[in-house]
Image (spheres, rainbow, N blue to C red):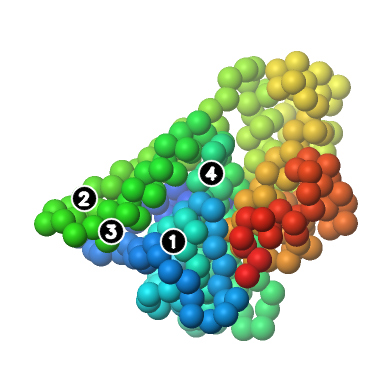
Amino acid sequence: MYTRREIERAGDDLKGFLRRVLADRLEDVKRGRTILHVPRPAGKLPEEGAGHTHPVAELFFQLQGRNHFRFPEQDLALPPGHVCLVPRCVAHRERRELHDGRYAHICSTLDGTGYGFHLYVLPAPGEKARVRAARQPTVKAPVLSDFADELAHAAHERRAFRRDLVRGLFVSLLASLHAILEAGPEQAGPAPVRDCRDLVDRQLGDPALTVGQLARQLGLHPDYLSRLFRQEAGLTLKQYIAHARITLGKDLLRATRLPVKEIAHTVGFADHAYFSKVFKTDVGKTPRAFRDESGTAG
């Protein structure tokens, strides 16, 4: 499947690694393998206060170990190479099982503005989880989000041709996501600005990311890059970096139950208190309040 070294290096180009995962799962489906699991979109977990929900559907790609899901009407142990589509607003719990001392999955979501995804790795028993996250803005996100909802519904319809319908929808969804990542950001403007945005996406988790660092990588003077970026994007490069970090932080607050401190570090804030301050200024509420309203605190 995927070696330890491949997964350790996946965070260096998370979009490229996810493209490979999507292509591999497409090939599996074309070969006739049954790899998609979809729980019924109904009910609550029997334990009082147990589980959590999300306002958008989630796609889990299992890489190593097993993710043990508890849903209202079933339990599922997701093995490597399989995919679980969790419909929006379906309560669930997760328990990670390591295999040969390793565990890894990619969780991805589609909201109104883009395709967000994060790699979750447990490197060894007792060690702290490692999370790398990225996001691909796309105008197609709302359509594909509705497409995921349709797939979740079709998986449990009573139709004679249900299996073929689900397979076709699943293949189309995987292929569309792969095409979005392969095409790159849907951005216009001068090449330096496009290249700068791409570098920001790749290095967002680095707290040392600065305008000067980006300018050096592009071979430009920092003042020229800042002026060109502001003319094209309508905001300063520093503001763009902060906004991109907050947007990615929102993805992780909705899709995971990681502590706010870890999310802050994952998206490039060395000081989690400063992350909370910037988040409240940008979003209008604290990260914890945002998570509570998103239904992910459970």
Residue 66 visible, this orientation: no
Q: Residue 46 in the image: x percent, y percent? A: 48, 80
Secondary structure under tag 4 reads loop
Mark 1 or mark 2, earlier in chain: 1
Residue 86 is tagged as: 1
Q: Mark on residue 111?
A: 4
Please give the name of the residue rendered at 32% of the width and 54% of the height, measured from the top-left corner: 153
Q: Is residue 91 visible?
A: yes
Q: Who comes first in sequence, dot 4 or dot 3? A: 4
Q: Secondary structure at mark 3?
A: loop
Identity, as a three-letter code, of the amino acid under mark 1: Val
Q: Which quarter of the figure has residue 254? A: bottom right
How packed mark 2 is, by other alpha carbons closer than 10 Å (few <14, some 14-19, many 20 or more), is some
Query: Residue beneath label 2, please?
Result: 165
**Is 52 left or right of 146, judged from the image as shown?**
right
Q: CA distance from mark 1 to mark 2?
A: 18 Å
Q: Amino acid at mark 4?
A: Asp
| Type of amino acid at the residue the image marks with label 3 | Ala
For label 4, count other residues whose C-alpha is less than 10 Å away and answer few (under 14), some (14-19) or many (20+): many
| Mark 3 lies on residue | 155
Residue 129 position in % (x across, y down): 65, 71
